[in-house]
Image (spheres, grey):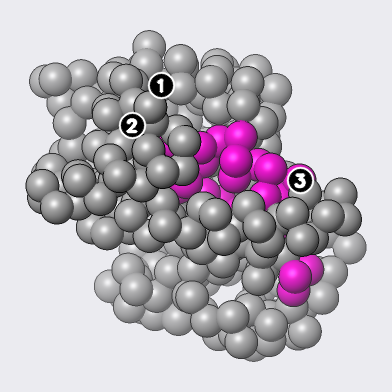
Amino acid sequence: MKQPVFTGAAVAIITPMHADGTVNFEELGRIIDDQIAHGTDAIVICGTTGESAALSHEEHVECIRFAVKHTAKRVPVIAGTGSNDTAFAIEISKEAEEAGADALLLVTPYYNKTSYTAIANAVTLPCIIYNVPSRTGVNLQPATLAELAKLPNVNAVKEASGNISQVADVAALCGEELNIYSGNDDQIVPILSLGGKGVISVLSNVAPQQAHDICAAWFSGDTAKSLELQLKALPLCHALFADVNPIPVKWAMNRLGWNAGPLRLPLVEPSAAVQQSLENEMKAYGVLK
């Protein structure tokens, strides 16, 4: 059995920016503290929601180092270090390991559309493989995950294919050799019901306690409560994905009073319709007065 890196809800944390577009580390620290205070079970730094694709190499590593130092072992820090360039992914994964990250999140190589073992073999940290075919153009098949799970430090998969039947096949093929996390906030409970260990969450940015509680209720045995909380969150989850992530969630964080700052191109501000939808759903859910 492979011990999960975390159990519960990990926040795929935004990267706050100053008005000039540079990383706002002071605000990042404030957000990390607030997340931990409200039950978040792990911090995922430099994931898609953190605009990793628009960060320079130096910024990427600096964000990882900052998150590790600031979190100070209160919860695990998982560093997004995947790339379509395997050599670069290995380099930044090694830097994340040296910085003290607790695990790596490795997206399947986009554009090149190939699978991999080279990154996992280059580090000793637990590796969470991220399957998100809507972005990468490749769907990591259950049989492939079963082979990758044979590597000692391939610890888990973040499943964002949206295909629950596929997740069931992964669970059946891999058993306790591969932990499963939901990569979609609207599928937390379905994946927990298949033996999942939690979620890597966008929702957690604006509702950390609530995302944590969906998982905590499930693991305490109150599956009815977990389902109730999941269904209550659905309208806000949908609103947070009404445009390309992290466009909506970063607007939402600014609306909640955080200094989330601007997005980096090619991401742009959400439309007025998306903003209104977010406003309505955050009020309905109770995170915005």
156 vs 279: above or below: below
> Residue 219 appears at what percent x and percent y?
82, 52
Relative depth, front residue between 63 and 152: 63
The magenta span reads: 193-216
Q: Earlier in the sequence, mark 1 or mark 3?
A: 1
Relative depth, front residue between 40 and 92: 40
Q: Which residue is mark 2?
A: 253
> Residue 276 appears at what percent x and percent y?
20, 46
> Residue 204 appears at what percent x and percent y?
51, 41
Q: Quick check: can you spot residue 31?
A: yes
Q: Could you say which quadrant of the image residue 244 lies in?
A: bottom left
Task: Give me the disc on residue 28.
Answer: 1
Q: Could you say which quadrant of the image residue 209 lies in?
A: top right
154 vs 166: above or below: above
SS at mark 2 in the image: helix
Q: Which residue is mark 3?
A: 216
Relative depth, front residue between 255 and 245: 255
Mark 2 surroundings within 10 Å by alpha-carbon count, few (fewer than 14), some (14 through 19), many (20 or more):
some
Q: Earlier in the sequence, mark 1 or mark 2?
A: 1
Q: Could you say which quadrant of the image residue 198 lies in?
A: bottom right
Q: Residue at x 68, y 86 (%)?
A: 169
SS at mark 3 in the image: helix
Marks 1 and 3, Cα distance to the nearest angstrom? Answer: 25 Å
Q: Residue at x 67, y 50 (%)?
A: 214
Q: Residue at x 30, y 37 (%)?
A: 252
Q: Inspect the image, locate mark 2, and give the three-letter code of the amino acid beneath it.
A: Met
44 vs 145: above or below: above
